């Protein structure tokens, strides 16, 4: 029984038995949820591999990224099975947002003008997301909270808002693309000297070291 089947078989009384967080399925190395979401299209410039093939995958990304609570995940997976067309459309909208965010940050990383159409579409998504934000009392003050995230589009709102926050933050100059041309995953370079080259040493850094080692020995 795979993850989706387990979610569908759960009764409401079983939700409390779900661990607070399962072992992650996605490699969330970017330091920002919107950049991690961009990276769910792997090797996009060489041999693109889609890591989010259905709505259950999107929900699992939301869990791994800390955007969804266990109970919300179960309800979303069940809703997606009951209303597959709505779930499919929401997934399509989420992937469109992913590519818009990619185009904006790709231009910034490469010091090119941001495509006006991409920025316009992102602004529209941010406006839609803002319509679902409200202030709630918290810890003696207030905080922003989105409407019920069991809405199919709830994850998209959160990701669009995260992209806007990053673009308007002092961390924007720290956005990088992995130096591996086979990878080019996005990440925030929070290293001490801001000279980080790889999305992750285990993923791409070590591969590059191995390639350099064999290249040196070939010419020796």
Image (tube, rainbow, N blue to C red):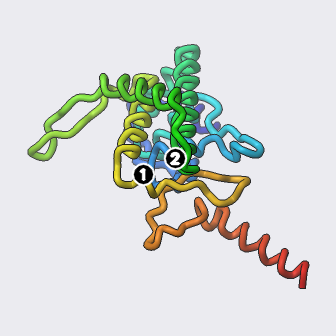
Apparent side of residue 184 relative to residue 12 in the rendered image (left or right): right
Residue occupied by mark 2? 108
Q: Position of residue 156 (x, y in %)?
A: 45, 30
Q: Are marks 2 and 1 in contact (CB under 8 Å)?
A: yes
Q: Quadrant location of residue 207?
A: bottom right
As drawn, 201 above or below 36: below
Q: Earlier in the sequence, mark 2 or mark 1?
A: 2
State the residue lying farthest toward the bottom.
220
* Residue 40 horizontal/vertical position (percent): 60, 42
In the image, residue 24 sits, relative to residue 201, either above or below, namely above
Which part of the image, by quadrant, shows the C terminus?
A: bottom right
Compared with residue 134, is residue 41 higher up or lower down, i.e. above or below? below
Which of discs 2 and 1 lies nearer the camera? The answer is 2
Q: Nearer the viewer, residue 208 or 26?
A: 208
Of the pair 66 and 166, the residue shown nearer to us: 166
Q: Position of residue 133 (x, y in %)?
A: 28, 29
The residue located at (41%, 23%) in the rendering is 151
| Image point (59%, 31%), residue name | 5
Q: Secondary structure at mark 1?
A: helix
Residue 172's tag is 1
Q: Residue at x 48, y 20 (%)?
A: 79
Label 1: few (<14), some or many (≥20) within 10 Å?
some
Q: Is 61 left or right of 181, judged from the image as shown?
A: left
Q: Can residue 162 be seen here?
A: yes
């Amino acid at each position: 029984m795979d993850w989706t089947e387990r979610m569908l078989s759960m009764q409401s009384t079983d939700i409390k038995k779900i661990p607070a967080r399962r072992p992650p399925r996605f490699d969330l190395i970017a330091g920002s949820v919107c950049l991690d979401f961009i990276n769910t299209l792997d090797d996009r410039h060489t041999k693109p591999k889609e890591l989010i093939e259905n709505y259950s995958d999107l929900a699992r990304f939301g869990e791994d990224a800390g955007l969804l609570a266990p109970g919300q995940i179960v309800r979303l997976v069940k809703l997606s099975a009951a209303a597959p067309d709505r779930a499919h459309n929401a997934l399509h909208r989420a992937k469109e947002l992913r590519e818009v965010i990619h185009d904006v940050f790709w231009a910034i990383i490469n010091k090119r003008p941001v495509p006006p159409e991409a920025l316009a579409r992102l602004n529209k998504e941010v406006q839609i997301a803002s319509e679902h934000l409200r202030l709630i009392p918290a810890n003696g003050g207030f905080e922003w909270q989105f409407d019920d995230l069991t809405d199919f589009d709830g994850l998209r709102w959160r990701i669009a808002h995260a992209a806007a926050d990053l673009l308007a933050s002092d961390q924007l100059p720290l956005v990088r693309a992995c130096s591996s041309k086979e990878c080019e995953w996005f990440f925030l370079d929070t290293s001490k000297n801001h000279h980080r080259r790889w999305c992750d040493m285990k993923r791409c850094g070590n591969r590059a070291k191995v390639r350099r080692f064999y290249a040196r020995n070939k010419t020796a």
